Amino acid sequence: MPPSKLDKNCFVNVDLDIYSKKDLKPLVDALGRGVIDLYVGRVKRTYEAHLELGWHHKRNPTSIIAGLCKLIEALPPAKRRIWNGAKLKSFDIGIEAPARGAHYWDAVSPEAVRAAARIGAQIAVTVYGPMKAAKRKGGAKSSR
């Protein structure tokens, strides 16, 4: 059996997911064009914001987490209080499962882990089933 191949195309993105008892729209507005808002609103009794970094030179978990941390650290005090008061703040690394015989590997740098810890956020990982293969077979492509 040939050795498995590294598939760097499995990395999808990093989403920043925030859950709070208070409205998150002022926080998202303060982040400005630095983020893309996938959803900002209320679900039952909880306010949610699901964001992506609006710009990044390197598409890898470390650079995206570090970029989002810099935006949070630069918030004015009133908006930072909204962030600090949120129930859950999570950097969710999205990974598509590689094709059979391949693998994906990446690491988050210690600096990015410390930056996430400084702002009180966790780092999570979501692994999606193979989306590219489903698309080739005529199935609908999943989305984050």
Image (spheres, rainbow, N blue to C red):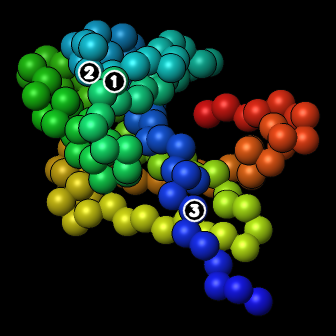
User: Whole-percent x and y of residue 37?
Assistant: 43, 18
N-terminal label among 3 and 2: 3
Q: Amino acid at mark 2?
A: Gly
Q: Nearer the viewer, mark 1 or mark 3?
A: 3
57 w.r.t. 37: above or below: below
Q: Amino acid at mark 1?
A: Gly
Crowdedness near tag 3: few (<14), some (14–19) or many (≥20) residues, C-alpha within 10 Å: some
Pointer 1: what residue?
54
Q: Which of the two residues, 25 or 144, is positioned nearer the viewer here?
A: 144
The image quarter containing residue 4 is bottom right
Looking at the image, which residue is at 32% across and 16% down? Answer: 28
Q: Nearer the viewer, mark 3 or mark 2?
A: 3
Pointer 3: what residue?
7
Looking at the image, which residue is at 19% across and 30% down? Answer: 71
Left or right of residue 39, residue 135 in this image = right
N-terminal label among 2 and 1: 2
Give the position of the C terminus as an image quadrant: top right
134 w.r.t. 22: above or below: below
Pointer 2: what residue?
34
For the residues labelled 1 and 3, the Cα–Cα distance comes to 25 Å
Q: Amino acid at mark 3?
A: Asp
User: Whole-percent x and y of residue 65?
Assistant: 30, 45
Q: Which mark is residue 121?
A: none
| Total marks in image | 3
Looking at the image, which residue is at 31% across and 44% down? Answer: 58
For the residues labelled 3 and 2, the Cα–Cα distance comes to 29 Å
Is residue 18 visible from the viewing direction of this image? no
